[in-house]
Amino acid sequence: MLGATAHAVGWPLPRGGSQKIGDALASHLRSLGGEIRTGERVHAIDELPNARAYVFDVTPRQLERIAGDRLPGGYRRALLGYRYGPGVFKVDYALDGPVPWRARECLRAGTVHVGGTLDEIAAGEEAVGRGEHPERPFVLVAQQSLFDATRAPAGKHTLWAYCHVPNGSTVDMTARIEAQIERFAPGFRERIIARHVMDTRWLESHNESYVGGDISAGSHQGLQLLARPMIRWDPYSTPARDVYICSAATPPGGGVHGMCGYNAARSALRRANW
């Protein structure tokens, strides 16, 4: 889904930062009479007010814990057997200028995939799959401030970059990420003013659904590419008629497209005969 969208229209970015997407969605929900509560951790479904449908944007591990005995044992075991994929190691940068890419095309690209040859990229990702940390990781780099002046002071730039690492990794990949960028943009290191590092532990502490740093809500290998979170005619529904799951652990998987939530909402409406 993400790949198809990116290749069709490019890699879009919201002016003013990604928070603008959340702000727009929240504004629309409130205009429809919806209410948003934040800062409240839900440990069990019984803590929630009575409702005709509960739609959870969590991965199977959290759904099993929150819904608990509302779900039959076999379904709960299937949720606990769900496989998570590689984690990510991410760095946010403040830069004294744009990245000095050798390739002119990269100087005007919102997103740059840094990996060298196809064989190098494959070798790096295969190493992660074996539980190793590649010396030359495949790095995703986003340089939105080239197109959105609100993201940095005049003349300065922001940048983020991440690479895949084994799930739950505690290895610091900062030097390897910067070496990869420096390889294709000599002088990059001299432009770094400050950096903020996020390993898999930080990511999971920030969002419990990022299990082991997996930002895609589960492995996309094997049957889980399509059968997410398990083989089921309606993957958004559960055996409990009022409980639904709408995270990227459901089709069509990871990506900023909103289709998991859209499909889960349609499932809830259809099942409740609304």
Image: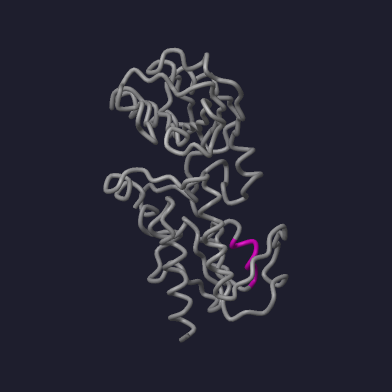
Q: Nearer the viewer, residue 22 or 208?
A: 22
- Residue 26 picture location, percent across and down: 57, 63
Task: Please tell me which residue is depicted at 47% across the width and 72% down the height of the picture.
Answer: 265
Q: Is 64 within the magenta?
A: yes
Comparing 179 with 167, the one in front is 179
Tally of numbered discs: 0
Height in image: 141 above or below 259? above
Residue range (magenta) = 63-69
Residue with the most extreme front position: 154
The percent position of residue 121, horizontal first and vertical second, equals 34, 28
Instruction: Where is residue 40? Give x, y as percent.
Output: 72, 60
**Residue at image location 55% in from the left, 61% down from the top:** 57
Q: Residue furthest bottom?
A: 273
At 35% across and 33% down in the image, what residue appears? Answer: 109
User: In the depicted view, which residue is nearer to us: 225 or 11?
Assistant: 11
Q: Main secondary structure of the magenta part?
A: helix
Q: Is residue 248 above or below residue 233?
A: above
